[in-house]
Amino acid sequence: MDGSSFEKPVTILTGLGTPTRIESAAEAHALLADWPRASRTAAHDIAAKACRAAMDGEIDAETARATFVAFARRNDLLAPQTSSSVAGGTVIDWATRSQRVNAPA
């Protein structure tokens, strides 16, 4: 784990709502660098500078992560927090349940 890796990834929604895990200041910086210039705000600039500073070892990665989360929240990019449990069973249980229930006896 390099010095710019986040302790906990930030999951954002990209494209057509695809969950994307951002695991480091470098990944966050790359996304911010690709952000349309016309849509850049103060939150974008702060997050981009913080991510660059973390990549350069000037600040810790968690500080950069916090600024990136603030940017993502302001732009409605944060993915909803989910759990692998669904109504008392795991996602795998629910995915295979219909196969077990509908299987010939």
Image (spheres, rainbow, N blue to C red):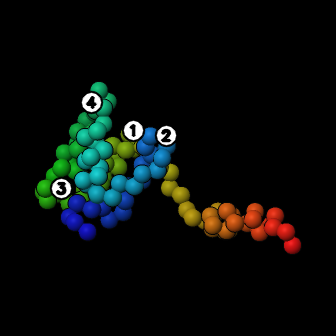
Q: Residues within 10 Å of mark 3 (few under 14, many from 20)?
A: many
In terms of image quadrants, where is residue 38? top left
Q: CA distance from mark 3 to mark 2?
A: 29 Å
**Which residue appears farthest toward the bottom when viewing the image?**
105
Q: Is residue 85 left or right of residue 68?
A: right
The residues bearing labels 1 and 3 have C-alpha atoms spaced at a distance of 23 Å
Residue identifier under label 4: 37
Estimate the x, y position of residue 101 in percent, counting from the top left.
80, 66
Label 2 crowd bin: few (<14), some (14–19), many (20+), radius 10 Å: few
Q: Quadrant of residue 94?
A: bottom right
Q: Which is nearer the N-term, disc 1 or disc 3?
A: 3
Depth check, mark 1 against mark 3: the one in front is 3
The residue shown at (25%, 54%) is 25
The x, y position of residue 60, in whole percent, is: 20, 60
Q: Position of residue 88 (x, y in %)?
A: 68, 68
In space, the residues marked 1 and 4 are separated at their CA atoms by 14 Å
Front-most of 31 and 88?
31
Q: Secondary structure at mark 3?
A: helix
Residue 93 sits in which quadrant?
Answer: bottom right
Q: CA distance from mark 2 to mark 4?
A: 20 Å
Circle number at residue 75: 1
Give the amino acid type for the residue marked by disc 3 in the picture: Met
